Image (cartoon, rainbow, N blue to C red):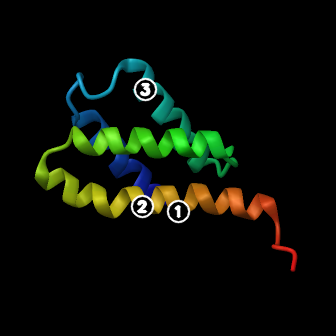
């Protein structure tokens, strides 16, 4: 996961300023830090993170998007796994 986070941060620095405002960039960094320390997202945070990831993708070049499309799903899956783990086993 460390490699995913590192590469995502590199791609985040490459996007054009008009794609994300500075506040959105800080929010993304906050969520990346939550993933790094394995802190559980709320469902609202997860939705916001997913939306912001979509904005990041739109701001990347075609070549960068190819790499991004390998990284972003891993980060989203990890964040969702933390939510599901917190919820505990499904009752039947």
Q: CA distance from mark 3 to mark 1?
A: 21 Å
Mark 2 secondary-structure assignment: helix
Side of 8 relative to 62 (left or right): right
Q: Position of residue 80 (x, y in %)?
A: 60, 58
In front: 49, or 39? Answer: 49
In front: 68, or 45? Answer: 45
Side of 22 relative to 19 (left or right): right
Image position of 80 with respect to 61: above or below: below
User: Which residue, given by chain and number where applicable, does mark 3 sit on?
Assistant: 24
Mark 1 secondary-structure assignment: helix
Q: Position of residue 83 (x, y in %)?
A: 69, 56
Q: Which residue is rendered at x = 24% and y = 23% of the image?
A: 17
Q: Position of residue 72 (x, y in %)?
A: 39, 55
**Which residue occupies the extreme front position in the image?**
92
Q: Position of residue 64 (x, y in %)?
A: 18, 51
Quarter occupied by residue 63: bottom left
Q: Which residue is rendered at x = 57% and y = 49% of the image?
A: 36
Q: Are marks 1 and 2 in contact (CB under 8 Å)?
A: yes
Q: CA distance from mark 3 to mark 2?
A: 19 Å
User: Which residue, given by chain and number where applicable, does mark 2 sit on?
Assistant: 73
User: Which residue, given by chain and number where applicable, does mark 1 sit on?
Assistant: 77
Few, some or many C-alpha atoms within 10 Å of disc 2 (few <14, some 14-19, many ≥20)?
some
């Amino acid at each position: 996961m460390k490699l995913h986070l590192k590469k995502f941060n590199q791609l985040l620095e490459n996007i054009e300023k008009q794609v994300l405002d500075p506040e959105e960039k800080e929010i993304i960094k906050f969520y990346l830090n939550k993933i790094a320390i394995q802190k559980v997202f709320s469902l609202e945070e997860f939705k916001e993170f997913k939306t912001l990831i979509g904005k990041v993708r739109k701001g990347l070049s075609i070549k960068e998007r190819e790499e991004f499309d390998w990284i972003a799903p891993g980060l989203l899956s990890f964040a969702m796994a933390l939510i599901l783990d917190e919820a505990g086993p499904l009752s039947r």
